[in-house]
Structure formats: structure tokens, C-alpha cells
Amino acid sequence: GSLKYGGVKCVWAGEGMEVVEVIPRLYPLRIGTKGCQTQGKASNQLNALRFATGHYVQAMDCNMGAFIGECFKVPYALRLFQPLDYTARTTTTARFIGFREFIFTGREGAVGRAHASAEWTFGTIFQRFLAGMDIRMHYGHPDFVDGFWARNRGGMSKCSPVVNLSEDLFAGYNARMRGEDCGHIDFLEFEKGREATIT
């Protein structure tokens, strides 16, 4: 039969978008269409995961970034998935590795400070606490994910028209219920912007 639906990978080619790769789909991946409703962020991650080719994946939000100095630390963070004395890909130390976020909009007034404090509390202090008790789950951005594991177990987050409050959390449930670990490291920190005004 003919290709009716597909996942499409595009690049910007100076003059416009250029299609690089197309992977056939059995069902459409559209938000809000009756019969195939999905949650936006989770469906985008699931679609992008099909094009990922490496062992590890990181899905960052569009309001995130990092200094070059932090990027130099990434290979050392990825080495924590499988230390040099591990010989088999099936024996990894974790399926998700999370780290700190610095909210750079925290200096932009009272609303920015409130968001920065909330993010520091949940995204750093609470994640450290959970990791120390060995019960941390996938928080979402900017966690590194074992890509092979995620591709074979339903993705990094769950696409659902109903479960859209914290779709990443269900990937954490998926890992914990399978007896996998989700670690947290403190030597790496990426930036994130949050709302700084109330309009």
C-alpha cells in the first residue's frame, strides 16, 4: 500500500525546510484529532526518538541552554550509565540520569524569583533527596535517557490525551516498576528560563 502517515525529519537549508528522512507510521500523530489524541510534548518526544541514533538521548525544552563549560562535562555524565568495568549493555547503572537546573530568569523580579525558588526546591533539592533514598524517578528535562531502553519500552514519556499534567513522570514509573534506577548528579547544571511577569 501507499504511505499515508509518516514521521518526518527536516533541517533548515537556508532557503527553507528540507526533508531529510521519513519513517512510515501506522497511525497519525496529531494533537486533538478524534481517535488519535496525544499530548503535545510527549508526542513530539516519541516522534523524535524514532530518529535518534545514539545510545543516549536528551530532550531539552526550547527555553533551556548551557554554557560551553557545562557541555564539556557531558561525556563524563554519560559515562555514568555504563562505567568502564561494565562489559554488557544490559547492565547499566541507571536508565535516567538527572541533574540541576539554574533558572536564569530568577533575577527578573518577584515572579521570576518565585519560579526560580520553586524549581530549585523541586528540581534540585527534592531530586537529591529522592536519589539519596534510591527512589528518584524521571523528572523530564534535562535528564539523559538510555535511548535503547526508552525505544524498547514505550518512549521517554507517555502520550495520552488524559495524562498531560506530568507525562514524564510515567516514564519514571515505567523505570521503577521494572527495577531500574534513575540517578541524580550535581556536577552538571543547565540553564532554564521561566515566566518572569504576570500578564
Image: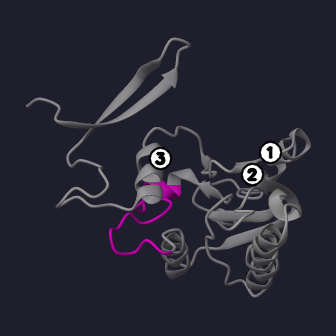
Report the front residue among 8 and 165: 165
Q: What is the span of residues highlighted in magenta in the rendered image? A: 149-165
Are the residues at dot 1 and dot 3 in contact (C-beta closer than 8 Å)?
A: no
The kind of secondary structure the magenta stretch mainly shows is: loop
Q: Which residue is mark 1?
A: 75
Are the residues at dot 1 and dot 2 in contact (C-beta closer than 8 Å)?
A: yes
Q: Is residue 157 visible?
A: yes
Q: CA distance from mark 1 to mark 3?
A: 20 Å
| Magenta-span inclusion, residue 163 | yes
Q: CA distance from mark 1 to mark 2?
A: 5 Å
* Type of amino acid at the residue the image marks with label 1: Pro
Tell me the residue at 41%/46% (across/down): 47
Report the front residue among 50 and 107: 107
Mark 1 or mark 3: name the one nearer the start of the chain.
3
Per the image, label 3 sits on a secondary structure element best described as helix
Q: Classify mark 3: residues with Cα within 10 Å, few (<14), some (14-19) or many (20+).
A: some
Per the image, label 2 sits on a secondary structure element best described as helix
Give the image location of residue 54, x and y in percent: 58, 40
Give the image location of residue 139, x and y in percent: 63, 70
Q: Taking 126 as reference, is 70 left or right? A: right
Q: Which mark is residue 78?
A: 2
Tell me the residue at 20%/46% (across/down): 26
Give the number of the mark in front: 1 or 3. 3
Give the image location of residue 12, x and y in percent: 53, 21
Quarter residue 24 falls in: top left
Tell me the residue at 76%/82% (across/down): 126
* Type of amino acid at the residue the image marks with label 2: Leu
